[in-house]
Image: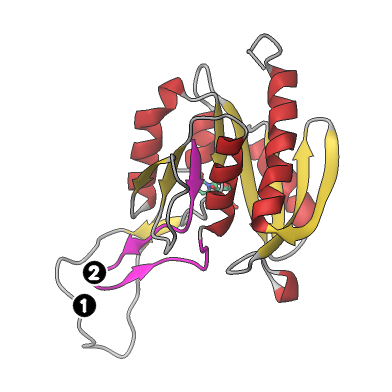
């Protein structure tokens, strides 16, 4: 399973909270993993992309829908890669009708969304879990904290500020962290980077589960 794209947390029927994720990294990774022989379920938030040919693509809108779809498909999953930029919070209520501008200020009450990656990693018989970390500062140390906090096998961190931002870009670079240390995949196109990352995931997966058929 690969999750990709942003999520959309509705405020009312026409507005919502979202982010700059284009979905390109997740779609490229789904394609590269499929080329390496995996049967892929791509669970995608709103993205203006066609899913790679042959990939089972499930389109969802909100983080809660993404969590539901992941859990419905996780039982037969060997490797879970959370590339989606899941919204951390959603509005407590989503108004049934368009919110009117009746006052000078408007306060939104938000509630935490489920952490899908942490939920997957905590399952009995959890798949090999890979997370992404989009960071604006201290990329490596923040990613290391997430690896531990979420209890995942590997994290791929990318910068999302300044000229080298991964968001809405054709290229990206990744710092890979797992229990054995840190390595770096230098900046290149997202499809090429996805191929390199696929090799790194496959190597660690077979190290973790040597009995699985390689
Ligand atoms: O905590 P943060 O959002 O920075 O972590 C990023 C990683 O966690 C990504 O792999 C993302 O897909 C995943 N995530 C998730 N559910 C959330 C928030 C993030 O699966 N609610």
Residue 92 at x, y = what percent? 30, 58
Query: Which element type, helix, strand or loop, lies under badge 2?
Result: loop
Residue wearing tag 1: 99
Residue at the left extreme?
Answer: 97
Q: Which colour scheme is used?
A: secondary structure
Please tell me the numbered disc located at residue 147. none
Mark sitting earlier along the chain (1/2): 2
Q: Is residue 100 above or below residue 132?
A: below
Rendering quarter of residue 168:
bottom right
Residue 171 at x, y = what percent? 69, 64
Q: In this view, does 125 lie above or below 111?
A: above
Residue wearing tag 2: 12
Residue 35 at x, y = what percent? 59, 37
Asked if residue 113 lies left or right of residue 126, the reply is left
Question: Dot 1 surroundings within 10 Å: few (below 14), some, or many (20 or more)?
Answer: few
Quadrant where the C terminus is found in the figure = top right
* Distance between the alpha carbons at the discs numbered 1 and 2: 7 Å
> Magenta region's main secondary structure?
loop
Question: Dot 2 surroundings within 10 Å: few (below 14), some, or many (20 or more)?
Answer: some
Asked if residue 32 lies left or right of residue 185, the reply is left
Q: Which residue is drawn at 24% across and 87% down?
A: 101
Q: Does the rendering let one see residue 123?
A: yes
Q: What stretch is highlighted in magenta?
A: 1-22
Q: Is residue 107 above or below residue 185?
A: below
Out of 24 and 182, give the one closest to the viewer: 24
């Amino acid at each position: 399973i690969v999750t990709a794209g942003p999520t959309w947390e509705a405020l009312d029927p026409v507005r919502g909270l979202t982010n700059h994720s284009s979905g390109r990294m997740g779609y490229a990774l789904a394609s590269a993993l499929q080329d390496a022989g995996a049967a892929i379920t791509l669970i995608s938030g709103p993205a203006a992309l066609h899913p790679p040919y042959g990939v089972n693509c499930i389109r969802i809108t909100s983080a809660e829908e993404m969590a539901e779809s992941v859990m419905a498909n996780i039982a037969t999953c060997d490797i879970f890669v959370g590339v989606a930029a899941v919204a951390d919070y959603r509005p407590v209520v989503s108004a049934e009708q368009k919110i009117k501008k009746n006052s000078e200020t408007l306060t939104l009450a938000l509630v935490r969304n489920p952490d899908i990656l942490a939920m997957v990693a905590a399952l009995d018989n959890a798949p090999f879990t890979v997370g992404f970390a989009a960071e604006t500062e201290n990329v490596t140390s923040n990613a290391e904290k997430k690896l531990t906090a979420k209890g995942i096998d590997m994290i791929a961190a990318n910068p999302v500020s300044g000229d080298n931002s991964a968001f809405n870009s054709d290229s990206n670079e990744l710092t890979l962290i797992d229990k054995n240390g840190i390595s770096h995949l230098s900046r290149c196109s997202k499809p090429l980077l996805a191929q390199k990352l696929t090799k790194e995931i496959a190597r660690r997966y077979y190290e973790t589960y040597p009995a699985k058929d390689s």
